[in-house]
């Protein structure tokens, strides 16, 4: 009797496990094995779990690569403006090594017409090693080893949450596939938000030498330019996003102003030497960065600014060339020091100070 029971239990358990595996493979909410089934949408909301899979299995010819400030682009803006089919390659930190890792996957699986690359100033001083494993990303989804996918197949969260979420958003929801990874819904962008989140350092550090980050700068530029030169058939639109003037106030207090300006000037010189690069610079857009109503915090701007950047890439506004790059850096230097000496002063009574500094 016991043997019979154990046999039935074993068979029943095996069938249940097989059904679980089958459900995950068929619906595949992290898109490890295939693009969305016919009738289902590409519901992309978990970049750490879905970005790599979508780059491997989706049909596309262009990539929007960047940090969290790039998540609020609508892919359709690029598709319509450039006549392409784009997909996002997002890493919150936006470190060069991490984004290049994603670009390598994209180039391995598709021939790319365009790469729209968001270059954050902090990426030029980041560690030139990938951070996925270090930060606890699900590495079983990042390799091509199906054996360790058991963590995906038998995951209660995938079965009970992710698959129903995929189906619900495909069938009943109004999810827009072009808004992949978009986090702006329900967020507020105004001066109260940015001033409430900015914790200001009370002291001002000594200004670092301009070449303080030279080694990191060179390594990160080499990572990026090696991908650019390896794919001459792909046109790279590299753009530097407009951080708020409070970000400039912050790096001044950290003693980083001259080093960051130097880094950007060196990056411009390096990227302008690449034949398949078009370079755009938005940091010195006075109208945007001095208007705190555009921001949620010192870095993150509203989707309207994302749209403005995309439109500028299409029209060619804010483009950097060998004749104007030094002038743009000079203008940014003037604006950066004007910020700390004048523009931020009317807001000082609303800025919180870090009492633990």
Image: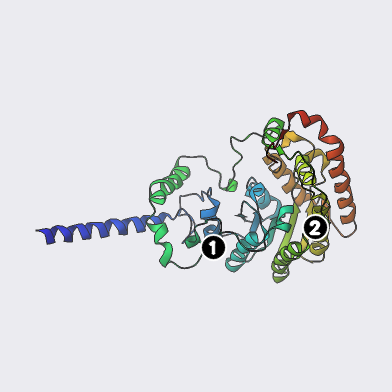
| Residue 323: x %, y % from top left | 90, 58
Identify the element where label 2 is drawn: helix
Quadrant of the frame with the N terminus: bottom left
Q: Earlier in the sequence, mark 2 or mark 1?
A: 1
* Residue picked out by circle 2: 263
**Disc 2 to disc 1, C-alpha distance:** 33 Å
Dot 1, how many residues are within 10 Å of its Cα: few (below 14), some (14-19), or many (20+)?
A: many
Q: Which label number is shown at residue 193?
A: none
Depicted 300 relative to depicted 33: above or below? above
Does residue 320 appear to the left or right of 301 in the view shown?
right
Identify the element where label 1 is drawn: helix
Name the residue at the top extreme.
349
| Residue 30: x %, y % from top left | 48, 55
Quadrant of the frame with the C terminus: top right
| Residue 253: x %, y % from top left | 78, 44
Instruction: State whether residue 120 appears in this view.
Output: no
Q: Which label number is shown at residue 56?
A: 1
Does residue 18 appear to the left or right of 174 in the view shown?
left
Name the residue at the left extreme.
1
Does residue 66 appear to the left or right of 289 in the view shown?
left
Depicted 145 relative to depicted 179: above or below? below
Name the residue at 37% across, 56% down.
154
């Amino acid at each position: 009797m016991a043997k019979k029971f154990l046999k039935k239990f074993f068979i029943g358990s095996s069938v249940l496990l097989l059904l679980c595996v089958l459900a995950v493979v068929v619906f595949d909410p992290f898109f490890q094995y295939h693009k969305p089934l016919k009738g289902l949408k590409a519901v992309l909301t978990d970049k750490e779990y879905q970005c790599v899979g979508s780059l491997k299995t989706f049909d596309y010819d262009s990539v929007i690569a960047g940090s969290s400030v790039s998540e609020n682009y609508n892919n359709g803006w690029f598709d319509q403006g450039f006549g392409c089919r784009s997909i996002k390659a997002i890493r919150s930190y936006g470190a060069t090594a991490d984004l290049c890792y994603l670009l390598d996957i994209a180039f391995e699986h598709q021939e790319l017409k365009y790469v729209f690359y968001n270059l954050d100033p902090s990426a030029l001083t980041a560690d030139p090693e990938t951070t996925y494993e270090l930060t606890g990303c699900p590495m079983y989804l990042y390799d091509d080893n199906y054996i360790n996918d058991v963590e995906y197949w038998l995951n209660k969260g995938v079965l009970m949450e992710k698959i129903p979420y995929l189906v619900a958003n495909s069938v009943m929801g109004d999810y827009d596939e072009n808004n992949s990874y978009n986090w702006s819904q329900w967020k507020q962008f105004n001066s109260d938000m940015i001033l409430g989140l900015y914790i200001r350092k009370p002291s001002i550090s000594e200004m670092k030498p301009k070449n303080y980050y030279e080694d990191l700068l060179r390594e990160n530029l080499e990572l990026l330019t090696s991908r650019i030169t390896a794919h001459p058939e792909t046109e790279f639109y590299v753009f530097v996003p407009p951080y708020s003037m409070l970000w400039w106030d912050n790096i001044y207090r950290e003693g980083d102003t001259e080093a960051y300006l130097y880094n950007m000037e060196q990056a411009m010189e390096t990227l302008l030497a690449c034949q398949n690069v078009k370079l755009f610079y938005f940091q010195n857009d006075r109208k945007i960065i001095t208007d705190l109503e555009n921001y949620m915090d010192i870095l993150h701007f509203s989707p309207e600014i994302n749209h403005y950047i995309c439109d500028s890439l299409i029209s060619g506004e804010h483009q950097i060339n060998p004749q104007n790059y030094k002038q743009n850096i000079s203008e940014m230097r003037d604006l950066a020091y004007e910020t700390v000496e004048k523009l931020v002063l009317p807001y000082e009574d609303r800025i919180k100070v870090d009492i633990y500094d």
